[in-house]
Every structure is written in C-alpha cells, then in structure tokens.
Image (cartoon, rainbow, N blue to C red):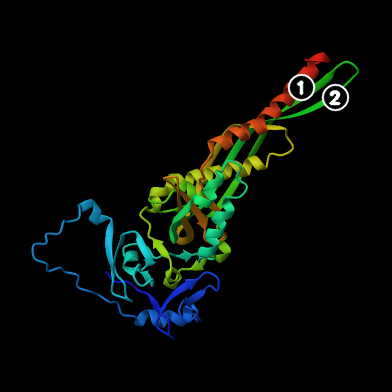
Amino acid sequence: MDTVNYKCPNCSAGLAFDSKSQKMKCEYCGNTYSLEELEQLAEQQDTVKEDTTTHWEGFEPEQWQSDEKENMAVWSCPSCGAEVLAEKTTGATICPYCDNPMIMPEQFADTYRPDYVIPFKKSKKEAIEALKKHYEKKPLLPRVFKNENHIEEIKAVYVPFWLFDLDTAGRFQYDATRSRVWDDDDYTYTETSHYRVVRAGKMKFQKIPVDGSKGIDNTMMEAIEPYDYVDLKEFNLSYLSGYMADKYDQEPDDLTARVYERMEQSVREGFRDSVECYETVTTKKEKITVTNKGQVKYGLFPVWFLNTKWNGQTYSFAMNGQTGHLIGDLPVGKTLAVKYWFKHHIPLTLIMAAIVTALRLKGVI
C-alpha cells in the first residue's frame, strides 16, 4: 500500500510537524516550512513500491489467519522502500528503518475525512519530564521505582474523536436543609429547616468529545481532558507528519450511550451547582431530555502514550499532547502504605478519643 511523506525542498530529508513552531521542520538542515508552502510538494511526491516475492526453494510460508489479516496491513516507505507491517487502524507512523515519517492516506479512504485537528504542542522531551514530575509528592510510591523503572515505549498518537452537539432540557427536585445553633446557660439548641428546591432549564452542548477507537481506554481519554478548542484547526494531512494516527473503528451511532452518559453527568452537575446557600442538598427527582440531536464532527486530538516497566509489571500513562495533563497508575509500596496509615490515622484516632472522653466528663454525652 502507498504512503506519503514530505521532503525538505532544501536537502530532501524527511519533514515532520514541529509542535513548538507549529510548522513542518527538517530534522537534518533545520529549515521550517508552513503548510501552505508544502501543499504543492505533497501532490508531486511519488510513492515507492517493491516486489517482495520470495523465490527460495522449499520455502512454504505460513499463511496469516483470517482474523489476523483483517486487522493488519503492509505499508511501503516512500523514502527507503522498506515495507512496514502495521495495524489497519494506523493512519501515520515512523519508518523503523530510516526514521522518516509515513502517512497512509489510503487508511482514510474508507472513512470520513476529519473535520478538525488539534496539533501537538508538547514534545517527547516534555512528555518524559511530565512523567518524572508525576512521580513527585507520591508518599506511597516505592523510592526504588523512580530509579529502576524504564520507559519501554513512548509514542505520539493522533486519536480519533467524534464531536457531538446536543440540546437538552432538565428538571430537578432537591431536598435541602439549613441549620442554626445557639446556646443558653443549660443547653445547646439546633434548629434544622427543610426546603424543597426545584430547578428547571435548558443546556446546550457543543463538541462533546468521545474517542472512536476500541483499542484505547475510554476512561484514560476522559481523564486527560479538557482540550482547548482555541487550537482547533481545519484538518490538513501535513499535521500528521512525524506522528502516529489512528483511524476510528466506531461509528457515531455506536457511541450514543457514552455521549448521553457524559451529557447527563454534566447536566446533573450544572443544575446541582445552582443550588447554593444550603448545608445539605439531596436529589429526589430528576428528568433529563434530549430536545435536539445536532451535528457530529470528526477530529484528531493529540495524545502521548508512555509505558514503563518495573518489577515485571507494565505501567501505562497518557498525556494530553496539547495541555500536558498526564495521568496513569503507579505502584503502591505495602510497607509505605502501612507506615502512612499509622502516621495519619493513629493520631487522629487518639485525638477523637480524647475529645469524646472530655465531653463525657462534662456530661455533654
């Protein structure tokens, strides 16, 4: 299958999108070019194909299983001619032989053209620094982990997102309370007032992001949000150069439940935040209705994926390639956990016991 990469007009080395300058940059001579300057260059590039048929006698190659063939594809690097085996959902990658960026335009032939892209703003160096900073101020993290864990994999990927517009209406009923306390010479009095609070209104949502790749952890993608839509650009294939890119394998209709789940949570939080000046608020009734399903757009958003290995176990992290927000799981040292519990809970238990004893001596309880 054919691929495209962008050549430097000055030295013919490969060009990649530079997150710092937001331009295409040659790693060899250092020149940078705007996307407009390279539009004609992309049209003129020829792809390189190579016949890989083997003629060794007695060689009986094992055939791919049908399920394996369905999920894999072979791509030809236009710079060195090497053929790269990749998952079918890969839309862009780096050639492992010559390190030139490869874009697989045919991967997007059977899909919708992305409407938007948010370019990478964070570099590989910044991703590694963010991971190291993530280790700081973690009292339960084993000390040896910082020194002994090794980054097994780090990759920059444009993740496919569907962006949904919705109009909603909500009606909520809450039970709320306010209390006042006063004393006289003999007693302490508490008066609690109960209220029924009703809120109703409409909420309009624009571009609710939901990732469209089955192979990517949905919880992880939601945890690195939000993305700043100020940097939302009209899609241009040049932005993918130098980065990996997945194509979606879930249609918008497949994601309706997740969209509604995200919408409903936001509606609940929005209406609940409007109920102020009460000490306790409990939701008694709620009704959320979608009044209009708006348009759906398709975008590619930047994510850094990092995997580290320590003590025979792999730990995965994801970083928002625009904002730098990083999340991921860390190991917990059992000895440290026990020490932490005794340090923070035993003193609190003793303090509470002392307070209870003092109140009993005064006859309060």
Query: SS for tag 2?
Result: strand
Query: SS for tag 1?
Result: helix
Which residue is denoted by mark 1 in the rendering? 354
Q: Which mark is residue 20?
A: none
Q: Residue at x 16, y 56 (%)?
A: 62
Whether residue 202 is visible, yes or no, is yes
Of residue 71 and residue 8, the one placed in the foreground of this image is 8
Residue 45 is situated, as x and y percent measured from the top left of the image, at 34, 80
Specify the amino acid type for callout 2. Trp
Can you say which quadrant of the picture contains the C terminus? top right
Q: Nearer the viewer, mark 1 or mark 2?
A: 1
Can you say which quadrant of the picture contains the N terminus? bottom left
Specify the amino acid type for callout 1. Ala
Residue 31 is situated, as x and y percent measured from the top left of the image, at 50, 82
Q: Residue at x 31, y 67 (%)?
A: 106
Q: Residues within 10 Å of mark 2 (few under 14, many from 20)?
A: few
Query: Which image quadrant for residue 185?
Result: top right
Which residue is denoted by mark 2 in the rendering? 182
Query: Which image quadrant for residue 237?
Result: bottom left
Whether residue 293 is visible, yes or no, is no
Mark toward the start of the polypeptide (1 vs 2): 2
